Image (cartoon, coloured by chain):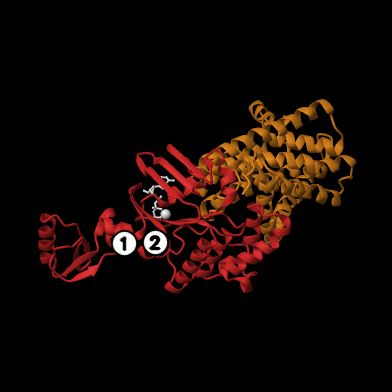
Amino acid sequence: MPALRLRGVVKRFGNLTAVDHLDLEVPEGTCVGLLGPNGAGKSTTMRLLTAQAIPDEGEIEILGLPLPQRSKEARALCGVVPQLDNLDVTLTVEENLRVFAYLYRVPRNDRKAAVERALQIANLTDRADTKVDKLSGGMRRRLLIARGLVHQPQLILLDEPTVGLDPQVRQELWALIDRLRSEGVSILMSTHYIEEAERLADTVTIMSHGQAVATGTPRDLITEHAGHEAVEVYGPPAKLHEVEQEAKAAGYATRRTGTSISILNANGYEGERRPTNLEDVFVLLTGEEIA
Amino acid sequence: MSAPKRLGRLERPALMGVLVREIINFASFWRSSTFSATVEPTVYLLAFGFGFGSLVSTVGGYDYVEYVGTGTVATAVLFSSAFPAMFGTFVKYKFQRTYDAILAAPVDTEELVTAEVLWLSVRAGTYGCAPMLVAIVFGLDPSWGMLLVPFIAMIAGFGWACFGTTISAIVNSIDNFNYITSAVLTPLFLVAGTFFPIDGLPQWAQVIAQINPLYHLVELVRHAVFGFEPGADLIHLGVLVFFALLMWRLAIHFMEKRLIA
Ligand SMILES: Nc1ncnc2c1ncn2[C@@H]1O[C@H](COP(=O)(O)OP(=O)(O)OP(=O)(O)O)[C@@H](O)[C@H]1O
Ligand SMILES: [Mg+2]
């Protein structure tokens, strides 16, 4: 039984189809990355999983429980880390965790230990009595993640867990997520950082305009869509345009980077070679530029 | 792993979770909210009781201070339920996204709304007694019936908290509360028999008073303090309970529409 399974899920907001016939599976104990540009439907997918949005079509199952009918039981087993910080700013770090220990029904005798453990995970034990609005951005993020783990969930839903953090804090969070997975927790993590998906995810689903445009291990996705090597050509815009037209005419897939053009799957193409990466696949499939 | 047990509606642990959050929060601002909830009606009591009381000595057979002291219980209930519900709910779903966080936990909208208004109704039950206690200092005679006032205030507070929650789920901007305050709450507050009896009012205002839960609250509180009139009071209580139940379901309905996409 997979930790999570979506089949043909559609979610519309008026004329806009935010999630469009999405199939997605998180096998138990694995980390699946949901990689997509802004507006791809990642957060909407996350909200469907907590029944904070109800799908127009399709089926969702979490740990064998059909949604939305059994969503309350499913929510009890899931830890959720939202994209937008919704900590209680008027409460202290410890109070935030305590409230969630109640909300997630941690048994009375375990509550104190659960809060202590979450404080350690957040690395905020010595800031337990600090009000949340006095914390730094990185500390808040760590608390937000620890809050979602207070009841030791079997499945965690992370919506862009490291957005806006400096590289060092990001590394720390990656180590934490990696550790959770090695402890057997199943993870669905949305991100638009390629490196994050590459580092943490066993399989990646690339999402664009609400659809899953490709699914596989990072390695397989790269080989399938971008080949082993790319040729990167630098030059003035006119030159790049010319190279692009030529390569396309010869049947090669290309992608633009700010100052260069890459010819993917470059077997037989002359020029400076580099290994392909997940970014090539992402840009190729979503048409998005990486900033 | 054993199959997770099926969870029902309005579960105690879910209500508890939401209540615990409110209680912890309250610990840090009880001073200011207790201050405004008690001082406001006291100011009304003193201003009307002594300002007006010097012109009229008795109203409807009561000492004017006694009349206003019991009437402003309804004012205190309204101020400590409808207004905090309107503003608090709006802030919690819109600005702080607190409700987003809570609904990701095993808590349903029905439980969230119910726990929030239960908490407000307990506060209204407590704060509602403040004017009566102040009036005792100024000469209102204590009576056994006063012990029922917190419970009456709680039922009414539940209804008004649900009313505030419903309004906040419907409006799109916090400024829209002004319309509700001016067009609904202030008129109802004035035709409730708090400061003057409604029988002096034109016919249409008396009709409005009959469907005004605040009027029934004022009457029931006065009768609890000065002596019940069983037939009439059963109707007053019935109206309050009906208002509370109706508003409760409306609050849940509109919050669900607001919170679940
Ligand atoms: N409640 C809503 N009402 C109307 N439209 C919505 C709602 N929620 C999301 N959308 C729209 O659905 C689309 C997908 O949004 P979503 O937030 O799921 O994207 P995302 O992949 O999480 O993007 P980002 O990386 O920017 O967080 C967007 O066009 C968004 O405007
Ligand atoms: Mg998002």
**Residue B171 at least partly seen:** no
Say which of B125 and A199 sits in front.
A199
The numbered dot on residue A197 is: 2
Say which of A72 and A140 sits in front.
A72
Depicted A216 relative to depicted A22: above or below: below
What quarter of the picture does the C terminus of chain A occupy?
bottom left
Q: Which chain is orange?
A: B
Depicted A168 relative to depicted A32: above or below: below
Could you give the CA–CA distance between mark 2 and mark 1, rounded to whole angstroms? 9 Å
Reading the image, the residue beneath label 1 is: A278
Which element carries disc 1, helix, strand or loop? helix
Which element carries disc 2, helix, strand or loop? helix
Type of amino acid at the residue the image marks with label 2: Ala
Q: Where is residue B233 shown, x and y percent of the image? A: 80, 30
Type of amino acid at the residue the image marks with label 1: Leu
Q: The red chain is which one?
A: A
* Residue at the image point whose x is 11% and y is 56% from the top: A250
Q: Where is residue A86 shown, x and y percent of the image? A: 53, 57
Q: Where is residue B181 shown, x and y percent of the image? A: 58, 43
- Ligand 2 located in image quadrant: bottom left
Please say if the residues under marks 2 and 1 sit with CB atoms less than 8 Å apart.
yes
Decide which of tag 2 and tag 1 comes sooner along the chain.
Answer: 2
* Chain letter for the residue marked with disc 2 in the picture: A
Q: Is residue B76 left or right of residue B62?
A: left
